[in-house]
């Protein structure tokens, strides 16, 4: 079997590990990292080639890619868009989709009303119905202005996603190339952990977490017996993040996690926590959701999120955000041992149904 050369184009060190799914002996993988070398990406200083995103390096990288058999873009920003359009047509290109590229143009679909009021600085004199109309018109206009993004994304041959449910959602609003399913490259064994009345909220400062709706639910003296860890250690700092902090800073049972954690520290929180709450309307925090399954954590997702429906189709127990208040009142925030075992079994079944070898074999056939 002839080895094929694959280039992986990254800008965010947090997702470089995602390239490992291509690690088979018939692929020659090359990491290109559009960034300066820092302490955060030090693990890749020897395995990756780093470039500062400027015009000189744009031309340099495009020349390097001329001998590629396949190129994978992890996310798509301005520099990557320019680079994408310089790749020769005969080279197949895939888009590892993270969401922000399209979702930011239709925030009216992705953000709750409470989030939009803050992010879009609602005029207090505008009634709700008028605000909703103005927001809709604003984002429709913004989406039309992004026609250049549509032209750029047409250069992609494939889009890489875990869930076909998300692909079908994307098709309703944007252009998407051919779908290729991503494999899940790990297997979980059940280990029982002693759980506390701690719940995890969100994965970052990202507005797509729609924190304010959750904070309104938990801001109740009835729920003083619970503790909450709110992950707030990356994402934009601004009006929205300030509002989130102000909303709940008076609550002594809410812990804002604002520092980056080691993997061990991160896992330990899930080991003692009973529930994870992700109020996103889109695919977000899959790594957090997988970690929750691994450690027997009950998962609350928004019913607008296609990931919720994908997981439930695969027979994994997922609870709706709409159940959260009543579950807190009745102390029904933990999975039973049988439910935890079931979730791990079903998760492993997803992984076994489409393996790393299956994924890489499909990519090889397409090149």
Image (cartoon, helix red, strand yellow):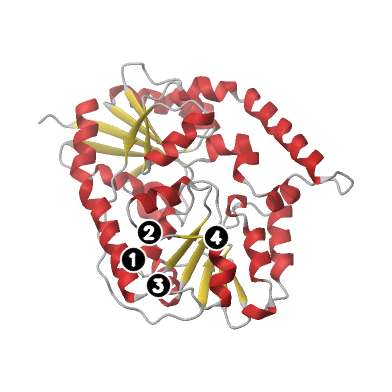
Residue corresponding to mark 2: 290
Alpha carbon of mark 3 to alpha carbon of mark 1: how far?
12 Å
Q: Nearer the viewer, residue 218 or 202?
A: 218
Instruction: Kindly check if marks 2 and 1 are in contact, taking CB atoms under 8 A apart as contact.
Output: yes
- Residue in view at x 46 percent, y 26 percent: 83
Image location of residue 290, percent across then percent down: 37, 59
Alpha carbon of mark 3 to alpha carbon of mark 2: how far?
15 Å
Q: Nearer the viewer, mark 4 or mark 2?
A: 4
Residue corresponding to mark 1: 294
- Considering only vertical position in the picture, is 236 above or below 297? above
Q: Is residue 41 left or right of residue 182?
A: right
Residue corresponding to mark 3: 335
Badge 1 marks a residue whose secondary structure is helix
N-terminal of the pair, mark 3 or mark 1, is 1
- Considering only vertical position in the picture, is 114 above or below 264? above
Residue corresponding to mark 4: 321
């Amino acid at each position: 079997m002839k080895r094929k050369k694959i280039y992986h184009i990254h800008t965010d060190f947090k997702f470089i590990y995602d390239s490992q799914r291509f690690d088979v002996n018939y692929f020659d993988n090359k990491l290109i990292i559009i960034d300066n070398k820092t302490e955060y990406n030090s693990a890749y200083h020897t395995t990756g080639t780093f470039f500062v995103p400027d015009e000189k390096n744009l031309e340099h990288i495009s020349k390097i890619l001329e001998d590629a058999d396949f190129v994978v873009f992890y996310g798509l920003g301005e520099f990557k868009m320019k680079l994408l359009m310089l790749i020769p047509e005969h080279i197949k290109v895939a888009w590892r989709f993270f969401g922000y590229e399209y979702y930011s143009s239709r925030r009216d679909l992705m953000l709750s009303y409470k989030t939009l009021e803050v992010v879009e600085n609602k005029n207090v004199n505008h009634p709700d119905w008028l605000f909703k109309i103005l927001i809709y018109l604003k984002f429709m206009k913004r989406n039309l202005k992004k026609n250049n993004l549509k032209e750029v994304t047409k250069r992609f041959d494939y889009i890489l996603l875990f869930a076909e449910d998300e692909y079908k959602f994307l098709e309703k609003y944007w252009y998407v190339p051919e779908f290729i399913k991503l494999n899940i490259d790990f297997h979980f064994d059940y280990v029982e952990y002693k759980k506390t009345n701690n719940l995890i909220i969100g994965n970052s400062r990202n507005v797509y977490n729609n924190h304010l709706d959750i904070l309104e639910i938990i801001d109740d003296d009835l729920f003083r017996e619970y503790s909450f860890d709110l992950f707030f250690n990356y994402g934009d700092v601004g009006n929205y993040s300030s509002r989130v902090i102000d909303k709940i800073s008076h609550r002594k049972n809410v812990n804002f996690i604002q520092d980056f954690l080691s993997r061990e520290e991160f896992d330990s929180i899930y080991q003692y926590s009973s529930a994870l709450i992700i109020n996103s309307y889109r695919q977000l925090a899959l790594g957090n959701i997988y970690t929750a399954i691994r450690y027997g954590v009950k998962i609350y997702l928004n019913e607008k999120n296609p990931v919720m429906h994908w997981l439930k189709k695969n027979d994994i127990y997922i609870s709706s955000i709409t159940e959260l208040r009543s579950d807190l009142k009745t102390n029904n925030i933990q999975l039973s041992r049988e439910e935890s075992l079931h979730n791990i079994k079903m998760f492993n079944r997803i992984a076994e149904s489409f393996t790393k070898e299956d994924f890489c074999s499909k990519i090889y056939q397409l090149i």
